[in-house]
Image: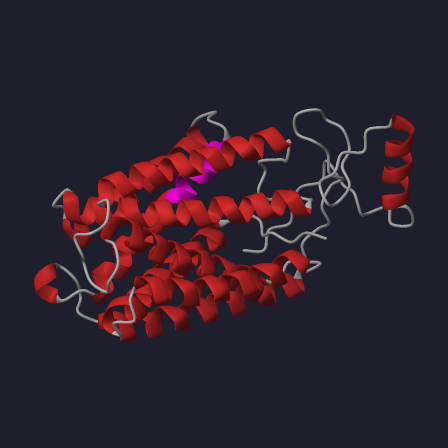
Amino acid sequence: MRKLPHVTLLFWILKIVAVTLGETAGDLLGITFKIGYVTTALIFLLFFLAVLVAQVKARRFHPALFWTVVLGTSMVGTEISDFLNRGFGHGSEPDGVGYATGAAILTTVLGVVFLVWWRTGQTYDVENITSRRGEILYWIAILASNTLGTSSGDWLSDDTGLGFRNAFLVIAVIMVMIVAAHYLTTINGMVLFWLAFILTRPLGAAGGDALTKPVDEGGLGWGTLWGSVALAALLVALIVYQAVRIRRRPLEPLPYPHNRRTGEPQQPNGAVVTHTARATEFANNAGAGDPTRFRFNEPAEQEG
């Protein structure tokens, strides 16, 4: 069964709201409540690991669970980024490596994640990940990209002098250009997806700062508490909407998994079935009794 959602407009709206909430919630605990980056990061890390295990063990797509994991990656990513860039403490401490250096380090980390992903032969098609190994790589890439997005958003807002609102507008323009490239060019769709996925994090970071920061600093002055409450309410409403749509029109099953590099069939855990006869038997047994289970050429149902 499909465990990851189709990439639609609703997907991007939910993603932006989730990562924006992750930004404001991280600031709420780390700065407003003065808990500190390390303690806050540990709290969010435990939360993230718990919901990630539940997601990996799930047998189908659950909107509330999926977006809770995305929220967890945003929360953990915010704290990792702040700890790396600012150092210990609960404010804008000068003890870290700085926004620019932090963004460079995290870009390297994300590049390594994608290299490992490529070497494993798992598909890059985020709508059709069928193995547990592929799903774990997917979540590692999301965590790394959200952490990178926090650093790059802080760098754009602070180091360049643009401020929160202008940084938000700059990133929004870039996102529009990516959408145009998707429809008007032949650039690989997964390349555009991950570029957009990375940029939605600084978009959310800049948007969160625009909501919570004082008016004299370029924000709306909502504060981290009320900004987080408003974003949480919006996220819950959108998740309920997606869940209702999927209940009315369930997602179609996934195609049979295969290694992206070799084309060999895989077991659901990602292990390659190397013997041809055994592979054929495995594929036949996997689809036996359910002629609709593996459909390769049918158009995907959209949940929103």
Visual colour scheme: secondary structure
Identify the image quadrant of residue 116.
top right
Identify the image quadrant of residue 137.
top right
Name, please, the residue furthest toward the left.
216
User: Residue 234 at x, y = what percent?
Assistant: 40, 69
User: Residue 219 at x, y = what percent?
Assistant: 16, 62
Q: Which residue is depicted at the point 26% across and 70% down?
A: 224
Confirm whether the magenta stretch covers residue 54. no
Left or right of residue 124, residue 41 in this image: left
Q: Which residue is depicted at the point 42% across and 68% down?
A: 43
Left or right of residue 243, residue 286 in this image: right
Q: Which residue is depicted at the point 28% across and 65% down?
A: 27
Mostly what secondary structure, the magenta segment? helix
Point out the image quarter for the C terminus.
bottom right
Question: Does the rendering let one see residue 176?
Answer: no
Identify the image quadrant of residue 54.
bottom right
Q: Which residue is depicted at the point 27% across and 48% down?
A: 153
Give above or below for 28 relative to 275.
Answer: below
User: Residue 260 at x, y = what percent?
Assistant: 66, 29
Q: Nearer the viewer, residue 39 or 164?
A: 39
Q: Nearer the viewer, residue 112 or 1?
A: 112
Confirm whether the magenta stretch covers residue 197. yes
Q: Nearer the viewer, residue 10 or 210?
A: 210
Left or right of residue 87, residue 15 in this image: right
User: Residue 143 at x, y = what percent?
Assistant: 45, 50
Q: Which residues are magenta?
A: 189-198
Question: Does the rendering let one see residue 59?
Answer: yes
> How many marks on residues?
0
Q: Nearer the viewer, residue 173 or 209?
A: 209
